[in-house]
Amino acid sequence: MPADVVTMEKVVSLCKRRGFVFPSSEIYGGLGSSYDYGHYGVLLKNHVKDQWWRAMLRERDDIVALDSAIIQHPETWVASGHLAGFTDPLVDCRACKLRFRADQLEEGHCGRKPSQPPGSTDACELTEARDFNLMFQTTIGPVKDEGATVYLRPETAQGIFLNFKNYLQFSRKKPPFGIAQVGKSFRNEITTGNFVFRMREFEQMEMEYFVAPNQAPHWFEHWLAQRMNWYTRLGIRPDHLRLRAHEPEELSHYSSATSDIEYRFPPPATPAREAGGGRWSELEGIANRGDFDLKSHTERSGQKLEYVDTASGERYVPYVIEPAAGADRAALAFLLDAYDEDEIGGERRTVLRLHPLLAPVKVAVLPLVRKDGQPKLAHEVHHALRERLGAEYDEGGAIGRRYRRQDEIGTPWAVTIDHESLENRTVTVRDRDSLAQQRIAIDELGDELERRLREPWRSPKLSG
Amino acid sequence: MPADVVTMEKVVSLCKRRGFVFPSSEIYGGLGSSYDYGHYGVLLKNHVKDQWWRAMLRERDDIVALDSAIIQHPETWVASGHLAGFTDPLVDCRACKLRFRADQLEEGHCGRKPSQPPGSTDACELTEARDFNLMFQTTIGPVKDEGATVYLRPETAQGIFLNFKNYLQFSRKKPPFGIAQVGKSFRNEITTGNFVFRMREFEQMEMEYFVAPNQAPHWFEHWLAQRMNWYTRLGIRPDHLRLRAHEPEELSHYSSATSDIEYRFPPPATPAREAGGGRWSELEGIANRGDFDLKSHTERSGQKLEYVDTASGERYVPYVIEPAAGADRAALAFLLDAYDEDEIGGERRTVLRLHPLLAPVKVAVLPLVRKDGQPKLAHEVHHALRERLGAEYDEGGAIGRRYRRQDEIGTPWAVTIDHESLENRTVTVRDRDSLAQQRIAIDELGDELERRLREPWRSPKLSG
């Protein structure tokens, strides 16, 4: 089987057909680069977020959770530097009237000669670049001209810094410790696209890890390893991931070191696809933010944001190591890496080889025929599994077609009820990847599937 | 013990002290009626949402999930009626310069004579009432004067109606079926307050249930019963809940019947507390929205939003029954109803008698002393429980103080490791409510606690 049958179009098409992701506000013609998650997309993304929380809260003792407001006090963005510096340089074309990012002209298309990037042809007459802030602005209070101007947060991180003092007090944690948050952020980007990869409204999974300054390099390395491991153990092929350290000139003003975890996305269009090609793009950034944020907020607010060791009397402003991941990008990467095609009995099959923990539905329950008491027993089995695992019942159409449908949404196991089931209360369990069928007693089914769900897992694509 | 020791102040104070809820952007002086959820608040609210999803997706087969964008196409709000009609009538006082809701003058306080409501005294000279739209407005696209005006959604429901057609196609559901969604909504209210009860940024749990028009009254009753049951089985006292049918003149333009599930909130201030008093306020509204939404979006978009039965050829625009709950209000109601005080050995104790499924932490693991190998064994026990259930380790301070801390965050069970534990690998399990201590083998601990977690539960306050 070819190692790389996946293209972005195939996954976008499957996402729409099977109810993972729909273009937002579609009946009104859509809203550029805005998407709604359908049923299976909600389940998949929830499982991605669950696994992130699990890695942060359940596999260690040094991290606590936060959920801060999207609209924060506007001073936040003065201190963080976003109000002054969170900008893109934009240029306008006087001829075609389109607007482009000055630093990404080679990726744009001139409105008059779409085969050409703007600026490369005499058709496009570009203005000087001007800086535009990427924060969405709105007004709080009921009247526009009297209300206060506020911003939708462009990152969740600042909510964590604002609460640093509260957390020292109630949590009794001391460095090294972290505060983790999952939630929506908003950036008014001009260059969006590539499906859910870059949207103006997106969901982040960020954690700020506070450490003694001299320990920062050690913890930076620790989090690089931890986060790479999280993606691979949930099924991303190691050769589809890489760590890329930012060059000194690429670093943000607050960071002394940043590395991106990059994923090898397939190119958007099949015709543009090169042999063995693909585009490395950021899934997650891991940054050493130093003491920039806590110091800035201390200056701006007048509140001392520092750690005081009551035993030794030592006091310092902690350094911060930040693994900042995108929930939408992670879900997309898991989908892309799981996408596969093979042949069963001469028929082409599309299958999502998702890690069972990420699969939207864990088990499908299918009566072989819609008679002879099979649906009744299947409902009984389904109801027992549904609450424990998340299960789906399907009695419509030929059994082969029902298997294919579950394969396409990545369901790892299908339980079939047949005439023998009614005689001896056993069922067959079909494995999505190996296609092996095993006969199991109904009474042992729940325990057996929960056991399989907890087993270490390795993508079958790796041996392909 | 008094049935009703709880006041809003006590709960607000506990929420801050123990890390459930903090005023947002506090280091910058806060942002009116905006709150951040701290560690235990995140866990509690996540458990509330989990239980809602469970009731929607895992206990029945007729509901699917959606997660639509916060910023939708602006035509959405033309069709829904929000752009024209989602307004509050506001009046200004020419003397004190404050602004009030014209329909809530009796609850306001004049800026000059705070003991008096505006309008009741000659100090306050009110303008005529004017209508102000409650939607937050922002601009998409990088430049204010050229971008498009869009709105932050004031309800999640409309995202469901926009996707109705997609769901008919991929999900193969037919009426009666529902689409459920959890997410943030935004309303630029002038009257906020009462802690997290009324915030401008809040989280909804909404489900739109599509039915044949003649079945609407039946399903309306069904959902009233289902939703009342959800609150009581998760621990709200039945006498703290009531169903209140809207009067005809109270109904929204789209609804032929609406009932609110109301909770008896304690009054905000102790001095204002009356004997047996309290204020009934809406937790959730259950509405028969008829075919208003699907018809409006059909008209506005030109896309036919109707159901066609392929077998019978019957076609109709489904009616919609909507149970719309607030996640923040639900979490607050569970906290208020769980709050209790009692006495142990002559000492006053504050305890949150939360349903174990809602409790932020399920089990605390406590070595009796910080020596003799007890911490090592306690860590082993903690690590085994942490991944399965959500557990906390605490070795700091006297055991009684550690129990109190867990009582205050509502942890149902505390496992104590003592000298006997090292001899025979047994531990004591202390119950938060009965205070009973039971000796259990370490190897059976996980199974035993999971069993207890699944048991039906009844608040001990009910027998108090």
Image (cartoon, coloured by chain):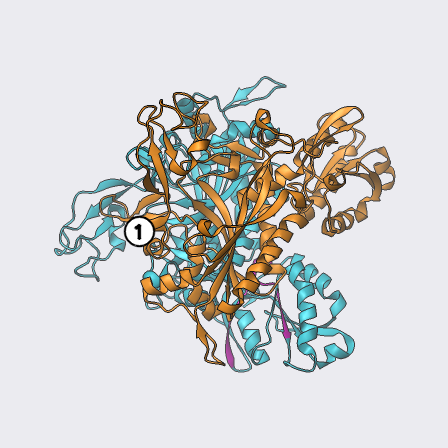
Chain colours: A cyan, B orange
Determine crowd level at label 1: few under 14, some 14-19, many 20+ residues with C-alpha closer than 10 A. Answer: some
Q: Does the magenta stretch include residue A348?
A: yes
What is the count of numbered marks? Answer: 1
Q: Which amino acid does label 1 sit on?
A: Thr
Quadrant of the image containing the C terminus of chain A: bottom right
Q: Which residue is drawn at 69% across and 64% down?
A: A384
Q: Give the range drawn in magenta.
A: A347-366
Q: Toward the viewer: A271 or B62?
A: B62
Q: Toward the viewer: A6 or B25?
A: B25
Q: What element carries label 1?
A: loop
Q: Toward the viewer: A102 or A63?
A: A63
- Check the residue under mark 1 and report the chain it is in: A
Q: In this view, does B51 lie to the left or right of A118?
A: right
Q: Residue at x 30, y 26 (%)?
A: B94
**Which residue lies under the disc numbered 1?**
A191
Q: Which residue is drawn at 50% across and 50% down?
A: B246
Q: Where is residue B273 in the image (x, y as percent from the top left)?
A: 60, 28
Q: In this view, does B371 lie to the left or right of A269?
A: right
Q: In which quarter of the image is residue B342?
A: top right
Q: Is residue B401 left or right of residue B311?
A: right
Q: In this view, does A236 lie above or below A184?
A: below
Residue A317 seen from this side? yes
Residue B370 seen from this side? no
Q: In this view, does B42 lie above or below A407?
A: above
Q: Position of residue B48 (x, y in %)?
A: 60, 47
Q: Where is residue A319 in the image (x, y as percent from the top left)?
A: 49, 30
Q: Position of residue B242 (x, y in %)?
A: 61, 47
Q: In this view, does B456 lie to the left or right of A279?
A: right
Q: In which quarter of the image is residue A344?
A: bottom right
Q: Does the magenta stretch include residue B149?
A: no
